Amino acid sequence: MDPLEFSRAKKAYNQSQKVCVLTGAGVSAESGVPTFRGTDGLWKNYNPMELATLEAFRRDPVLVWEWYQWRRQLIRKCAPNPSHFAISQMEKEKEHFLLITQNVDGLHKKAGSSKVVEIHGNIWEVKCMSCGANFMEEGDFEKLPPECGKCSSFLRPNVVWFGESIPREALETSIEALSSCDLLIVAGTSGYVQPAASFAQMAAKNKAVVMEVNIEKTPNAELVDHFFLGKSGEILSALVSEK
Ligand code: BV8
Ligand code: ZN
């Protein structure tokens, strides 16, 4: 990491009053959670359009639930990593702060983040396909698909599938923060999935400084002010540590 570039970014972070952070699967990679498009990517063995859609669930709820149950069992063994702790530290240091995460693994909250918008939902939450019942359930389901205790319809993971809209309040809160922050840090996202993929442009358009942390270049390369090639655990920790 170029020390001059880093000290400039460090200065920008220290001077920022309103910080917004956008994370993707890459910040959970160091916890052992497979990413979506990386070499060990989740999508490698499955086609997202096959499984992460309402149509797929309607067509084969058992198959979709087997995939989610497998992911829940895997993620349950994962602990937050330095990326998550550094971001929860930022929330403590900055009066105006919002974390927007595309991740559904719940690791940010486990690391102490509370000002979090989970724009793609949460894999530990389930909701009823009919009556709107919606609750956390961290254990395995005996029977797949699980049925609602109230009305016996199927329960589904409370995540946003492809073709489904981001919950209105989550989107509004995110857009409000992106239009008023003076610093956006984008970490661990390949920048393909909309609407999150347009968030960096939104912040840049509002004259925020945009920093990106990734182990590879992303489509945001042109518009970021600071790009750090490396692991988010190391880079985000360094950003919040030395004063
Ligand atoms: C919407 C929850 C309006 C589920 C996810 C055709 C039909 C229908 C829709 C569309 C269409 N064409 C386009 C769309 C829009 C679609 C979309 O964007 N499709 C893409 C694929 C082209 N978007 C939607 O449908 C969204 N809704 O637009 O509503 C609408 C409505 C109807 C019709 C049209 C539009 C909803 C999208 C939400 C999908 N749900 N997840 C689940 O998890 O099961 S998306 C899924 O991908 C995850 O949430 C994940 O977070 C997300 C994005 O991926 P990344 O987080 O970026 O992860 P990835 O693996 O890709 O990258 C990891 C990165 O980390 C890499 O860059 C890697 O280099 C880096 N990295 C790895 N290790 C490290 C690291 N970086 C730093 N340190 C490390 N150690
Ligand atoms: Zn129900």
Image (spheres, grey):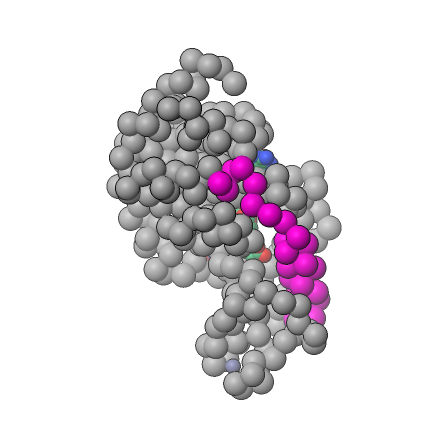
Residue 85 shown left or right of residue 45 in the figure: left
Q: Nearer the viewer, residue 81 or 202?
A: 81
Residue placed at 56% from the left, 45% from the top? 80
Q: Nearer the viewer, residue 55 or 188?
A: 188
Write down the region rendered in magenta.
Answer: 59-85
- Image height of 62 relative to 16, above or below: below
Does residue 20 appear in the picture of this structure?
no
Residue 39, x across and y down, in percent = 69, 38
Residue placed at 27% from the left, 35% from the top? 17
Q: Does the magenta stretch mainly form a helix, a strand or a loop?
A: helix
Does residue 56 appear in the picture of this structure?
yes
Q: Which quadrant of the structure image shows residue 55?
A: bottom right
Of all residues shown, which one is farthest toward the bottom?
Answer: 151
Q: Quarter holding the C terminus?
A: top left
- Image height of 215 relative to 79, above or below: above
Residue 126, x across and y down, in percent = 54, 69
- Image height of 88 relative to 227, above or below: below
Residue 194, x across and y down, in percent = 47, 48
Q: Which quadrant of the structure image shows residue 153?
A: bottom right
- Image height of 75 relative to 31, above or below: below
Does residue 138 belong to the magenta stretch?
A: no
Does residue 61 belong to the magenta stretch?
A: yes
Residue placed at 57% from the left, 30% from the top? 231
Residue 19, x across and y down, in percent = 33, 38
Residue placed at 60% from the left, 59% from the top? 52
Of all residues shown, which one is farthest toward the right?
Answer: 45
